[in-house]
Image (spheres, coloured by chain):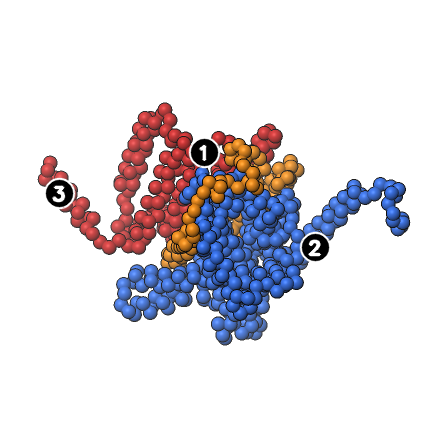
Chain colours: A red, B orange, C blue
Amino acid sequence: MIEQLNQLIEQLLIQTAPTVPSIQQVVFVMLAIPAAAAALMVVLARNLFHSALALVGTLFAIAGIYVLLEAEFLAVSQILVYVGAISTLITFAIMLTRGMMYGATSPLNRQAGTAIMIMVLLFAVLSGLVASMPWPENLVALETFSWGIFSNRITGEAIIASLGQKFLTTYLVPFELMAVLLLVSLAGAILLARDRQ
Amino acid sequence: MLTQYGFILILSAFAFIVPASAVVMGWLLGPKRPDAIKTSTYESGVETIGDTWVQFRAQYYLIGLIFLIFDVEVIFLFPIALAYSQLSLFAVISAITFVLILLLGLLLEWRKGALEWN
Amino acid sequence: MEQWSESLFNLLGGLGLPQEVSTIIALAVGALVLASVAPVLALVLIWITRKVISRMQDRIGPNRIGPFGLLQTVADALKLLSKEDIRPANADFLSYALAPILSVFGVILTVAVVAIAPGWIGADLNIGVLYLVALGSIGIMAALMAGWSSNNKYALLAGFRVVAQLLSYEIPMVLAMLGPVLWVGSMRLGLITEAQSLNIFGFNLGLGWFVILMPGMALIYLISALAESEQTPFDLLEAESELIAGFHIEYSGMKFAMFFLAQFLNTFFLGAIGVMLFFGGWQGPFVDQLPILGVFYFLIKAFAFYVLVMWIKGTFPRVRVDQMMSFAWKVLVPLVLSLILWQMLAMKLFGPVWLQYVAVLAGNVIAIGIVVNVLTSHFKQEQVRTKRAFGPKSLIGTMQPYAGD
């Protein structure tokens, strides 16, 4: 048993031999740690406004990770829609609700135990998924690593153009249905606002 | 392409340092004599009455919501604009339908008075 | 990589540094140059503002400190530096301190996509136009933070109104920017600027500006940019009589200066982007032969735009807040959407490019004409209604002879 453990540790040490990390790894760590820390703050902050600000920070960091994955349009639409519109709405809702302004709301409630259990289970599932994926070791392997999605890679502006094209050809019906969905949400908002008055 | 974003990352570091250093210099160089009247809330020379809360006005939230809807519409219009040369007339008509449905929503808001009084 | 970063990178690579380090150093040098443009530019802009406004008000403006008063802003900055940093009690320290910094942060980042000369752009992003809009959201967050963290209900109210104004005019601005993007088929600002060349027999006249093609879009962009940078006629939040001083009531010293710095720079950069999108950026005659001329053209156009904004500031009164919001949602958004729809149709229905050109131009002019007609008749009716409401009901007691009609 101890021999197997030794072998495992040796293998780990060989695999994780200290190499100079690439810039992408450095930037990823620079983005991921603030993202995780801000996400923690969203949940644990005592003051609700601080939670909202931490949410904005998380969304910005996630947008940075999207950029690192070369999905720049996704990153900028995340900032435009999530940070620009949805965070503003959330902040409005927080500020306009009397009694929420001052701090000292406890982040825990009576179901803390169940929450922790579910959290641990979810973490186990996710880390199992991540660990068991056959990640390619280098760029050459990435090119041949194909689930049918990456078989014809396009980069840069062509991605956004193909996105636009797909909206109007392959995914036309969901696209138009989404317009109807937005219309319905507009109507619903008017209804709610008028009831209050 | 990633070097471009690297440039922006470095620029953002500088863009943060420039105003931050100005503010810090201002804090260092100014006198520090806080007293009760200077640090109290300003209300045209009168003492504050009541807590700092604002009356709920649905207009602000509605404007934010309408902005959200149109923001999403804009996000969809930009890729369509980029792919424009490869689109057929039918695709263009469907894009126009999309915009018209949302214009209909704006008209609805107008008639129901959601765009008033702010 | 852009031209400037390539050349710097090769220079540093020649010194024998590893590839990544030389990339970082090359980019850092460029970033440092661009970031230091901001304070210098602010000095010039504030001087221009004061001189133009004072000439409009028939006075001279600063002319004591430095030649023509050029160093006045430096003196003012030094004065603001020496002010006490008053922090209101119960203010939330981190957001209170962070809000002015974030304001300036968002504005300085716009410099990255401004194209000064052919090939001289910080980063010609594939999503250039949307990047600019995304930076606006940082400004919105900063305004909300400033309003809330001052722990003052007037600041909070003013913060809400600023955010409502910024949100309302962001949509017409973004959709007006969609016009050139649609025509060129790309969001890259460098490409859009290059597409505004007028090639006659292979010689680039550099006068194929988009303002000639879509004047309606340019006008809508101008109006929305005025509102986004909180300049007259939309500067009700600076007005001393409205809600005291807006959301910067509780700010003093350098933090207060930062908000104003952000506003001046924002006005200039929105103007620079309008110049790039509609007025050709660095395009002009003979710019192919002498690229440095591009810098000259760009700066002239950008500063001309800024002087125009100051001219408007010295001339027009302010609009009320409800007039401002209804103008955005009831006039600008439907107008710009119909212009976009017409442009989409014209680009697909008509074959030859010159015919599309004429169709888009005609559509723009007709749409603006219709809107101006409807608005003037609406306001004339309103004038008549208010005159009737307040006019004298009988002649008894008035000393004026009845003047007919």
The residue labelled by disc 1 is: A102
- The residue depicted at 30 percent of the width and 55 percent of the height is A23
User: Which mark, residue A7?
Assistant: 3
Disc number lying in front (2 or 3): 2
Alpha-carbon span between mark 2 and mark 3: 82 Å
- Counting every numbered tag in the picture gives 3
Judge by depth and name the residue closer to the eye, C22 or C311: C311
Alpha-carbon span between mark 3 and mark 1: 56 Å
Residue C58, image quadrant: bottom right
**What is the chain identity of the residue bearing mark 1?**
A
Q: Are marks 3 and 1 on the same chain?
A: yes
Vertical comparison of A109 with A5: above or below: above
Vertical comparison of C99 with A126: above or below: below
Lower position in the chain sequence, tag 3 or tag 1: 3
In this rendering, position of residue A19 left or right of residue C297: left
Name the outermost residue toward the bottom. C289
Whether residue A78 is visible, yes or no, is no
Contact between marks 3 and 1 (CB within 8 A): the answer is: no
Q: x%, y% of residue C133? A: 50, 51
User: Which mark, residue C264?
Assistant: none
Alpha-carbon span between mark 2 and mark 1: 52 Å
At numbered mark 3, what does the secondary structure look like: helix, strand or loop? Answer: helix
- The residue depicted at 76 percent of the width and 44 percent of the height is C386
**What is the chain identity of the residue bearing mark 3?**
A
User: Which mark, residue C369?
Assistant: 2
Q: Which quadrant of the rendered structure holds the C terminus of chain A?
A: top right
What amino acid type is highlighted by mark number 2?
A: Gly
- The residue depicted at 52 percent of the width and 47 percent of the height is C248
